[in-house]
Image: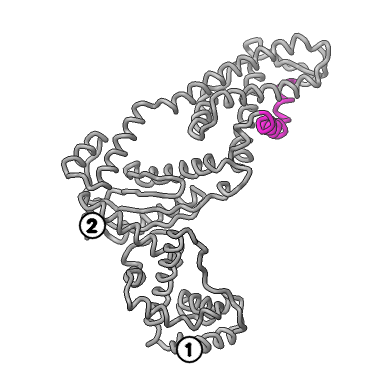
Amino acid sequence: MTGHNSPPQDDTGWRIPVIGGVPADQRLLGAVPELAEAIVDALLDRVPDYQRLPRELVTGELVQVAARRIRALVHAVRTGLPSPDSEFAAVREAAARRAEEGVPLDAVLLAHHLGMEVCWELITRHAHDADAADLLVLNRLMLNHLRRAAAATGAGYLEERRTDAGERQRTARQALLAALLDGSPAGAAEEAAAQAGLRLPPAYAVLRLAVADHPDERSPDVDRVVAGHRKLRRLRTELDHATRQSALSALTAAGGPVLVPLEQGPDAVPDAVWQRLAETLRRAARAAGAEIRAGVSAAVPAEVPAASALAAEVLEVARAVGRPPGLHRLDDLLLEYQLSRPSQARSRLASLLAPLDEAGELLTTLRVHLAGGLSRRHTAQALHLHPNTVDYRLRRIAVLTGLDPTRPADLPRIAAALAARDAERNAERKAERHTGQDAGWHDTPARKPA
């Protein structure tokens, strides 16, 4: 055996193979970052299915997984024993994730072979002629490790694909959700709940979610479907965790309905429950990496269809008037909701701000000033203006519209006019979409000096 290092034998008589004068475990361990990057590069170069994965997965999880696999191989080389079962449990879990993301099984198996190939290439480039015996020992170790990894991969992948019991449970829960949303007779909903192993609660918080794109969904180099699926999986996982898997949902990457059981009737839900639900939505948005808006209403099971329609309307109003991401109830948007209903009063209210159409900076100033609690300093900081400029703009608004933002008596009328204007613009936008002429609408940008 060539080399300056001669690893001692352990109690079992095992001696670490030495390649090029360096124990093989040390050579592998010293190159973990380099090898992990090389393995992922090989995947992207030789396996097209991995090229479509989101960048966050490639540069994050896959590199970390590759590094963990290398360290597991180091353990086998150092001890002559198979890696701990926990390592192959992690292999099963990773394979299940790839199955859920739609990566073919042959591509997942090829990833393990490429990993071994990259590691073998690193070691053999330093080999001497006298290392043949140790290379044979190392080859046998690596093949055994690969065999167990492949077996764990196949098991994890297929388990995800054919979880019959779990699939039956999911199917039963979806049937219950459909029965509730369709307004099926009480007996049908109770039967569907029984088949799902559930009991109908006193009421549901009925949510309609709108989920924004994750940055990966807008990347031309990433498969949009895969990126959306990963976002949706993280969102569902957080909802399941927060609701102890009691929520019913039919979500897509863009959103959908969610029913969360309540312990109280719809008219007796404490504010603390709504606050917890709002926090759950914030955590779900962080987990998904995307903004989430939701309309919500509470209802007894028999009235879920009406509550779902109301939640959808509340969501639409919240989006139309520019409310931030988060949970929105009818009580939060009473004025805006009422003004979203078509009427002569709504049109006349909206027209009060028409003089500002040619001075978009004035309308922006008005919105920011109202949203900031009428604080002159807040408005100046938010718009990067001098406070005197804010005063000037507010005076201009009063001159043009006859409504003075600094006069308390005018504030309710101004707020109503803004809400009516947003509702009118939203109605125009929907009409344009229906006629195939969706040119969009925005507050007119500044064209005149303030």
265 sits to left or right of 395: left
Disc number placed over residue 398 in the picture, else none: 1
Residue at position x 62%, y 46% from top? 220
Position of residue 346 measured from the top left corner of the image (x, y, whole percent): 35, 76
* Viewer-proximal residue among 232 and 448: 448
Quarter holding the C terminus?
Answer: bottom right
86 sits to left or right of 112: left
228 sits to left or right of 175: right
Residue neighbourhood size for the residue with mark 2, other residues' Cα within 10 Å, grouped as few (<14), some (14–19), many (≥20): some
Residue range of the region highlighted in magenta in the rendering: 23-46
Count of marks overlaid on the render: 2
Position of residue 337 measured from the top left corner of the image (x, y, whole percent): 34, 68
Q: Is residue 84 above or below residue 296?
A: above
Considering the numbered disc 2 on the image, is that residue within a helix, a strand or a loop? loop
Instruction: Examine the image and state in which quarter residue 387 appears.
Output: bottom right
Residue at position x 34%, y 53% from top? 207
Instruction: Say whether residue 32 is visible.
Output: no
C-alpha span from label 2 to label 1: 43 Å
Magenta stretch, main secondary structure, is helix
Q: How is the image coloured?
A: one colour
- Mark 2, residue position: 266
Instruction: Say whether residue 259 is visible.
Output: yes
2 or 1: tag closer to the N-terminus: 2
Position of residue 148 measured from the top left corner of the image (x, y, whole percent): 56, 18
Q: Is residue 276 above or below residue 177?
A: below
